[in-house]
Amino acid sequence: MANSLDTIFAALADPTRRAILSMLLEDDMAVTDVAEPFEISLAAISKHLMILTRAGLITQEKRGRVKWCKLEPDAMRNASVWMQGFGQFEPVNLDAFERFLETELDSTPE
Amino acid sequence: MANSLDTIFAALADPTRRAILSMLLEDDMAVTDVAEPFEISLAAISKHLMILTRAGLITQEKRGRVKWCKLEPDAMRNASVWMQGFGQFEPVNLDAFERFLETELDSTPE
DNA sequence: TAGACATTCAACCATTTGGTTGACGATCCC
DNA sequence: GGGATCGTCAACCAAATGGTTGAATGTCTA
């Protein structure tokens, strides 16, 4: 299930993947260009991009032989909102909150 | 290094650990009481609590033979701030959450 | 003091993760 | 057509993860 808190937080737990997200904040990028600043193999980057895609944090679109990677900032919103639950509001039922986020995801257009 | 984004996000990626954090939102708890609702062993819970502690998300204080677990909501701030850098997701829609709670009450008889 | 309780430690296991390399399927362009 | 480029796949590896069980440690209490 894409966009679950599990996959989003797991995707964010890796520094390489967070760096990729930061790069994509500037602009959409081809896979090869994403890989350029890193010292690991292209295949490894490709795997990282898969994980980010499964988490819904980016989308990939192939045009010709180039696959373009695009940041999807909204995906982080659920995780962000979940985290806001700690500290900001008064004791709230976070289980209910998690269910709320799930139903919200189902109903979010696009 | 406690409180790094790596350890915080990795700690949050597990549903058991998120559930524990939610429980601690209500009140401080002893390890045994934390473990009670889960079906895994006490040792496994102890490990989860270690991970949450290393991430700085909780603290543990031993009084007598009981070790009390306490939520540290501030620790999430670093991660939260990092995430805010991505996109302008709207602030938490508390109204929507309240409506959700109402419909949930209607649909889940007790 | 002996037992019960609270918690961790140690050893172990299966699965996942993050990386490698080499081969492969597309696609562009000369 | 044929070579270069883009990206993934497959097989493999080491290390980390999440779980188990049983023994050990420390503390309370009858």
Image (tube, coloured by chain):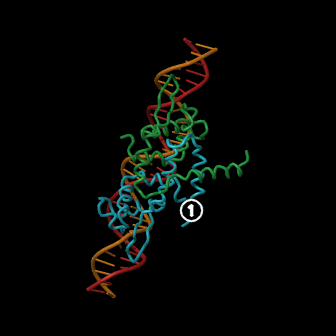
Chain colours: A cyan, B green, C red, D orange
Side (left or right) of A107 relative to B3 = right
Specify the quadrant that holds the N terminus of chain A: bottom right
- Coordinates of residue A4 in the picture (x, y in percent): 53, 55
Q: Considering the numbered disc 1 on the image, is that residue within a helix, a strand or a loop?
A: loop
Chain of the residue on which disc 1 is drawn: A
Specify the quadrant that holds the C terminus of chain A: bottom right
Q: Quadrant of residue A28?
A: bottom left
- The local crowd at label 1, few if under 14, some if 14 to 19, many if 20 or more residues have their Cα within 10 Å, is few
- Coordinates of residue A65 in the picture (x, y in percent): 38, 76
Residue drawn 43% across and 58% down? B87
Residue drawn 29% across and 61% down? A37
Side (left or right) of C5 relative to A20 = right
Residue occupying the far right of the picture: B109
Residue occupying the far front of the picture: B95
Residue drawn 30% across and 59% down? A38
Residue type at mark 1: give it.
Answer: Thr
Q: Quadrant of residue A67?
A: bottom left
Residue behind mark 1: A108
Residue A51 vs residue D25, the one in the foreground: A51
Residue D26 vs residue C12, the one in the foreground: D26
- Coordinates of residue A32 in the picture (x, y in percent): 33, 67
B1 w.r.t. A7: above or below:
above
